[in-house]
Amino acid sequence: MLLAAQLLILAIMCRSSWRVQHGGVSSSRRAAILLPWVGSTYMAASLARLAIGMSVPRAPAWFKAWISGTFHLVLAGFLVTLAIFHQRANAPEKFDNDQ
């Protein structure tokens, strides 16, 4: 069941990436604000989980699970990357001083 859920998440990530690349996603100011917080918090928690697994000898097996830990890092990285897309699309235009 877990593998099926992970494959579904990866399929959604691929579809989202394809839509962003081909202009099928419009930028969102709300996503530009929310996604960096969600993605960075998720990344920090995932890194903390792996750090605990490596540094605490008696940590539960869940903290030492590398495959799921890596998957969470990839997903967090995807959210941060998607946040950058929304931030750049919503950034104010810079003036060109050369003209």
Image: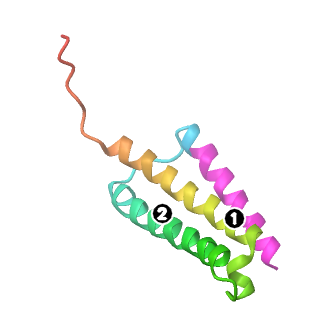
Residues shaded magenta: 1-19
Residue 76, relative to residue 99: is it above or below? below
Residue 31, percent across and down?
39, 59
Type of amino acid at the residue the image marks with label 2 = Gly
Element marked by disc 1: helix
Q: Is residue 7 magenta?
A: yes
As drawn, is 2 to the left or to the right of 88? right
Which residue type carries mark 1? Answer: Phe
Q: Residue at x 63, y 76 (%)?
A: 55
Mark 2 vs mark 1: which is more N-terminal?
A: 2
Residue drawn at point x = 71 percent, y = 83 percent: 62
Mark drawn on residue 24:
none
Number of the label disc, if any, that sits on residue 71 = 1
Spatial CA span between label 2 and label 1 = 14 Å
Quadrant in which the C terminus appears:
top left
Q: Would you identify the image quadrant in which residue 12 lies?
A: bottom right
Relative placement, left or right, of 5 versus 91 is right
For this orientation, the residue located farthest to the top is 99
Q: Residue at x 17, y 17 (%)?
A: 97
Q: How far from the left and from the top, in percent, is residue 35?
A: 43, 61
Q: Which mark is residue 39?
A: 2
Q: Specify few, some or many for label 2: CA neighbours under 10 Å numbering under 14, 14-19, or 20 or more.
A: many
In the picture provided, is 10 more to the left or to the right than 93?
A: right
